[in-house]
Image (cartoon, grey):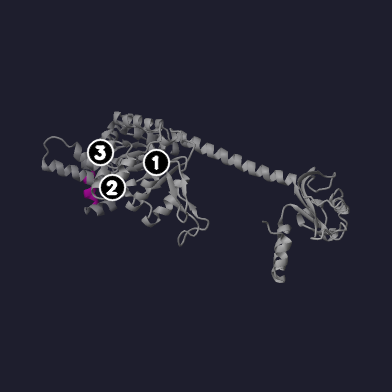
Amino acid sequence: MSVRIEDLLHSLPTEKRNELLVLYERLFEISPDGFLFVDPEGKIVYINPAYCYQLDVKRSDAIGRPVTEVVKNTALVARMENRDFTVERNVLWETLPGQFKTKEPYVIVTRCVVPDKDGNILGAIGQVKFINETLKLADVLNNMSDELKFYKEELNRLGSDHYTFEKIIGSSPELCRVKALARKAAQNDFTVLLTGETGTGKEVFAHAIHYASGRRNRPFVRINCAAIPHELFESELFGYFEGAFTGARKGGKKGKIELANGGTLFLDEIGDMPLSMQVKLLRVLQEREIEILGGEQTLPIDIRVIAATNKDLPQEISQGRFREDLYYRLNVISLDIPPMRQRKSDIQIFIDHFLREINQQYQTAASFSPEAIRALESYPWPGNVRELKNAVERSYTMADGGLIQETHLPPHIVTRVSCSLSSGPQTLAHAVQTVEKTFIQKALWQYHYNIKQTADHLGIHRSTLYNKMDYYGIKREPG
C-alpha cells in the first residue's frame, strides 16, 4: 500500500514537515524539466527556473499572473473547470510558434488537477519535458555508446592483429610443434598450462590462443600471481562489496575473475599462488561460480583459464607447495615452450627482428658483423628471448648505430663464448691471455672506453693498458 504525500506531511512535526517541503522545492529548482503549480483561480503560485528559461520570463513577473497569460495554450484551467481529476502522463503537446526559447515544436506533458479529501480543488500541476533537450542528451549518450563500441572493436582488432600465431617469431621444428598444438587448443575452451623458462614467451602464446579462439572479442585479463601480496589475493581475484572489510573501497571493486567473464583469465606464475588460494581457484574451476567478498550469493562465471609457470609443478607438489588436484585440473592441455638453446636456428631470426625494429625507430641502418652473429649464436641464452632482445639493444647502443662488432656485445656474453669456443690443447699462457683480453674488453665497455678510469679499475698504468690493447688488437674507441 503506497503512502500519500499529504498523509506523510500531516504525520510529521511542523519542523520536519518544513524541512521536507524545502527538499521538495530544491528538487523542482534543479530539475531540467519545467514545473508549474496554479491555484484554483488559475493563477501561478510556483514556476521553476527551467520553465522560466524556456518561456523567457522572469519568475517574479510570472508568479500571481493567470497561467493563460504566461502559457497561452495551457489546459490546466480547462481541466479544473471540468473537474477532470484523471492524471495525464507523457502527453505529446504541440507548442505555439515562438513559445519556447529553444523553438521546441512539441513537448511532453504530465499534468493533473489536485483535490482535497472533500473533493475541493486545491489547484493543478504540470510537468514539461523539452524534446530538443531530451534529444540532445540522447544524441550525447548514443555518440558515447557508438564511440565506446568503436574503441572496443578497434582494441580487439589491434589485439588480434598483434597477438596472432603468425606474429610468434621462429621457424625451428621445436617451436613449430608447440605452435601447432597451441592452434588446436584455441579451438576449444579446455584449460591450458604453459610451462617453460623465464623469457621464452609464455604470455605471447596465451594471447595468441585467446585471439584465435571464439572468445577473441571478450576480455583477456592477466594476473601475475607472484606480484600480488598474499593478504590481497582473494580480494584481487574475487572482488568485494563496500564494507566487506576494513579499508574496502567505497562502492566495492570487481575482481579479476568477474572482469574476465566471457573471456580468458591468464594466471601467470601460477606456481607462486598461495595454497589457500589454490583451494578457492580449484572450486572456481569445478563449480564455475564465484562468491564476492562481503556477499551472500554466488555469481556464475564463464571463463577460459590459461595458466603459466617457470616452475617444476610436480616437484612443487612433492614438496607440498602446490595442490595435486589443482595441477590436474589445470594441466588439460600442456604446452612446454622450448628455450633458446634448443632452437638455435631461431636466434638469427630474432636478431634481425629486433634490429629492424630499432633501425625503424631511430632511422638508422645498423647491422651485426658475421663474428658478432656467430658469438650470439654460440651463447646459451639462459634468459631466453628477453635476454637476447636486451643484448641486441645494448650492442646497438655501444656501436652508435653502425656496424656491431663482437667487442660491442655485452662482456659476459663475449667472455662465456670465448671460453666455450676454445678447443683443442691449450697452454696455460694462452688460457690466461684469453681471459685477460676478455677482462680488458669488459672493463673498457663498463667505463665507456675511458682509458684512465679503465686503467684505475684494472690496477695498471695507462701505458700498460695501451700496450695490452695493441697486443690483443683491441680498438681504442668503440666501433
Q: Nearer the viewer, residue 266 or 196?
A: 266
Identify the residue at image location x=88%, y=53%.
Answer: 81
Of the 4 image quadrants, the one containing the C terminus is top left
Residue type pointed to by label 2: Leu
Image quarter (top left, top right, bottom left or bottom right) of the N terminus = bottom right
Reading the image, the residue beneath label 1 is: 305
**SS assignment at label 2:** helix
Instruction: Give the Cα separation between the discs numbered 1 and 2.
Output: 49 Å
The answer to whether mark 1 and mark 2 are in CB contact below 8 A is no
- 294 relative position to 282: left or right: right
Position of 340 with respect to 229 (left or right) is left
Tell me the residue that label 3 is attached to. Answer: 380
Secondary structure of the residue carrying tag 1 is strand
Residue type for callout 1: Val
Question: Which dot, 1 or 2, sits closer to the camera?
Answer: 1
Please name the residue shown 39% across and 38% down the image. Answer: 206
Amino acid type assigned to the residue bearing label 3 in the image: Pro
Badge 2 or badge 3: first in the primary sequence: 3
Please give the label number shown on residue 444: 2
The answer to which image quadrant residue 91 occupies is: top right
| Structural distance between the alpha carbons of marks 2 and 3 | 24 Å
Bin the neighbour count of mark 2 within 10 Å (Cα to Cα): few under 14, some 14-19, many 20 and up: many
